[in-house]
Image (cartoon, grey):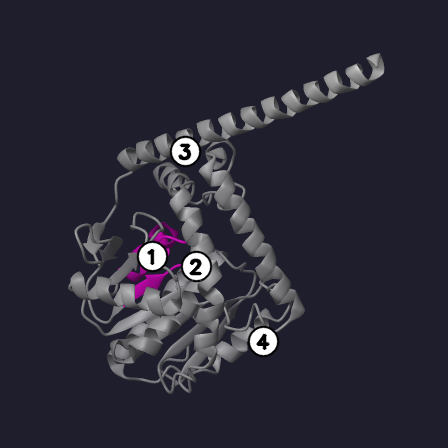
């Protein structure tokens, strides 16, 4: 009898121990969530938008997108960053291009200083929002669209839906629409990324990405201290990680649409490939060659020694990216083909 009584007491203690631990975890989670909300509000006051906020939605509280334009001249260059990217990522390229034409960088909905946007975060939805942004900000075409990584998919989506506004494309180590579907390695990498984003969303909600160096999107070393602080603040919000996950979730539908879209005719197209990027399955060079074949008026340049992000991140490579952009700008202004003797120079 005493043994049974002792067992009951032990079980009761274990039960209350588990309840106490669970309660403590719930309490810590609540504190973390409160800290996240408070820190986000503090950062909003500390780091105001660096450009203009343009309404793109309707209703009592229409959504606003953040836009920064520099320089003068036509055609206007529109910079589209990669997954989770903001206009801060163009801190080297934008001022370089602005020396010769007007160039605008913006934050997609839910990223940087822009308000969240509706689901799905597909290429079609992003193209609609960018089109509305440019119209409402009184930035007329024609446009030379520049996309890095996932941004390459998004500018192609814009060219698909608004072809009359697009005078040229520059794809900077851009994502191919079969990179997550053609091979087993690519499909596995997409699933890995999906799990990573889900984990990051949880960590962000609990404020943990503010207490440790951000393991996913730490600020580039080349940023100024002020820009680095802005970068860290913008990439630590719950909204940011919700948007990254939403864009990734919709990217397969975007890729499907682009695979069915056909080629670009003779639209000026310059593909710049990072020579050190093999991709998830080792076929990155193949994918890049296929992107260059989308237009009969294209140039494909491989930048030896450059990694995926180096084309906008490092000064020696960002200059090559800027040169490639301006080469397309010149082709649009003169009407010359990119592969003509006067234009076919390496960026």
Please name the residue shown 27% across and 84% down the image. Answer: 335
- How crowded is the residue under tag 2: few (<14 C-alpha within 10 Å), some, or many (20+)? many
Q: Nearer the viewer, mark 1 or mark 4?
A: 1
**Which residue in the protein does label 4 denote?**
286
Q: Is residue 32 above or below residue 195?
A: above
Query: From the viewer's perspective, is the residue at label 3 or at label 1 nearer?
Result: 3
From the image, which quarter does the C terminus lie in? bottom left
Q: Residue furthest top?
A: 2
- Which residue does the numbered mark 1 point to in the structure image? 108
Image height of 143 relative to 86, above or below: below
Q: Residue at x 24, y 53 (%)?
A: 63
Q: Which residue is mark 2?
A: 247
- The residue that label 3 is drawn on is 36
Structural distance between the alpha carbons of marks 1 and 4? 29 Å
The residue lying toward the viewer, choosing from 33 and 305, is 33
Q: Is residue 85 visible?
A: yes
Q: Secondary structure at mark 4?
A: helix
User: Where is residue 32 drawn, in percent x and y?
Assistant: 46, 30
Q: Quadrant of residue 23?
A: top right
Foreground tag (4 vs 3): 3
Sequence-wise, which precedes: disc 4 or disc 3?
3
Using residue 22 as the reference point, say whether residue 142 is left or right of it.
left
- Magenta residues, start to end: 77-98
Q: Earlier in the sequence, mark 4 or mark 2?
A: 2
In this view, the mark in front (4 or 2): 2
Q: Is residue 84 visible?
A: no
- The numbered disc on residue 82 is none
Contact? badges 1 and 4 (CB < 8 Å):
no
């Amino acid at each position: 009898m005493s043994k049974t009584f002792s067992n009951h007491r032990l079980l009761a203690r274990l039960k209350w121990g588990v309840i106490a631990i669970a309660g403590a975890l719930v309490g810590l989670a609540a504190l973390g969530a409160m800290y996240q909300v408070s820190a986000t509000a503090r950062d909003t006051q500390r780091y105001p938008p660096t450009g203009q906020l343009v309404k793109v939605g309707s209703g009592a509280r229409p959504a606003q997108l953040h836009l920064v334009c520099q320089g003068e001249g036509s055609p206007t260059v529109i910079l589209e960053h990669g997954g989770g990217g903001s206009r801060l990522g163009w801190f080297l390229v934008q001022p370089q291009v602005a020396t010769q034409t007007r160039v605008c960088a913006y934050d997609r909905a839910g990223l940087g200083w822009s308000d969240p946007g509706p689901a799905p975060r597909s290429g079609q939805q992003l193209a609609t929002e960018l089109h509305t942004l440019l119209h409402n900000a009184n930035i007329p075409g024609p446009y030379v669209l520049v996309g890095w990584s996932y941004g390459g998919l998004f500018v192609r989506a814009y060219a698909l839906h608004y072809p009359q506004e697009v005078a040229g494309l520059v794809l900077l180590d851009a994502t191919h629409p079969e990179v997550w579907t053609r091979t087993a390695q690519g499909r596995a990498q997409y699933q890995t990324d999906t799990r990573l984003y889900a984990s990051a969303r949880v960590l962000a909600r609990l404020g943990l990405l503010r207490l440790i160096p951000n393991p996913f999107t730490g600020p580039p070393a080349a940023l100024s201290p002020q820009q680095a602080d802005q970068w860290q603040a913008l990439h630590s919000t719950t909204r940011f990680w919700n948007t990254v996950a939403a864009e990734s979730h919709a990217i397969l539908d975007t890729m499907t649409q682009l695979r069915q879209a056909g080629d670009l005719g003779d639209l000026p197209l310059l593909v710049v490939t990072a020579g050190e990027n093999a991709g998830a399955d080792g076929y990155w060079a193949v994918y890049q060659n296929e992107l260059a074949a989308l237009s009969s008026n294209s140039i494909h340049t491989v930048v030896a020694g450059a990694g995926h992000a180096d084309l906008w991140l490092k000064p020696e490579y960002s200059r090559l990216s800027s040169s490639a952009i301006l080469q397309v700008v010149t082709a649009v202004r003169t009407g010359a083909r990119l592969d003509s003797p006067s234009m076919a120079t390496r960026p």
